[in-house]
Amino acid sequence: MSNTQLTIHISRTSVHVAEVLRSNQEIIQQHHFELLEGTPDAYRRRLKEIFNSITTLQDEYPEYTMAWSTPKHTLVPLSVFNESSSKAVFQLMFGDALDERMIDFNRLMELNVVNVFEIPDWVKSFFIIKYPQIAFKHEHAMTLRALFQMGTFKRQITVSVNDEYVNITIIHKNELIFSNAFEYQTAEDILYNLLFVIEQEGLTNEEGSLSLYYTDDKTEDIAKQTYALVNQLKPLKSIKLNTIDSILKLQTLCV
């Protein structure tokens, strides 16, 4: 189909591949795989095996996008970034003295922020060779860009569930009010962090809607458990479920 997009969401522990219809964000086909490798070469070999095994993908797509998932990412104002460097920002936030080649960034000019993150070489090297025209960003940069293509005036709380962490984002009156990543093991962990954010932001007596995004069946189950807990406790004066949906669909809004 000429109106489809190949979307990929990858971390150190999993890779998710979906063919998405751009006109209505319908997923035509999707595939999910665990990654348990220990070396860069092992990751490349496993990814080659995975993509060779998916025989139903088209030979070519109009658009290719890839979202890299890691909890080691941060948002900084564009003005701060322009006076520093991605390596300096990353070391300040995480204390890790990584090789500069393992640090990347995405500018979000519409928000005047920059997303700085770590990304191992095997990710870039495999996908640039496999799909030379692929556009890749940190998954949170893609999510933010997609969210700001939607209605952003009313208060919107978004929880995007990745393998080992969630991003909690609050948008209100067309502005990014809050954004941070939190590690989790259970839905109760996500709820705890969400309640903490709501209290810290002084939103307990406010109204808002909640959207949750997932990558696969496992994270979808966690997302649904989280919403059930939120619906039970009602941490906001009035909160309604906006959507629980695949995060892979959002990539169609980022090209």
Image (tube, rainbow, N blue to C red):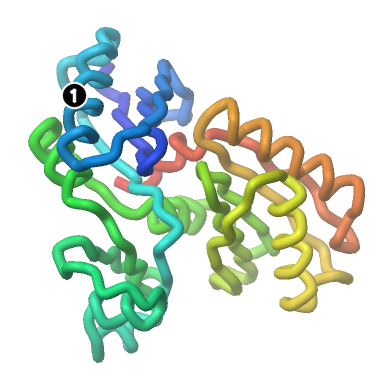
Across and down, in percent, residue 188 comes to 76, 49
Q: Is residue 31 above or below residue 145?
A: above
| Residue that appears at 33% across and 71% down | 109
| Residue that appears at 18% across and 27% down | 45
Residue at mark 1: 48
The answer to whether 169 appears left or right of 142 in the picture is right
| Residue that appears at 88% across and 71% down | 205
Across and down, in percent, residue 247 comes to 49, 39
Q: Amino acid at mark 1?
A: Lys
- Mark 1 falls on what kind of element? helix
Q: Is residue 96 visible?
A: yes
Q: Is residue 252 visible?
A: no
Across and down, in percent, residue 32 comes to 42, 24
Residue lying furthest bottom: 83
Count the labels in the image.
1
Given residues 65 and 255, the one toward you in this image is 65
Across and down, in percent, residue 17 comes to 36, 27
Residue lying furthest top: 55
| Residue that appears at 62% across and 71% down | 173
Q: Is residue 101 above or below residue 54?
A: below
The answer to whether 78 appears left or right of 61 in the picture is right
Q: Is residue 22 above or below residue 137?
A: above
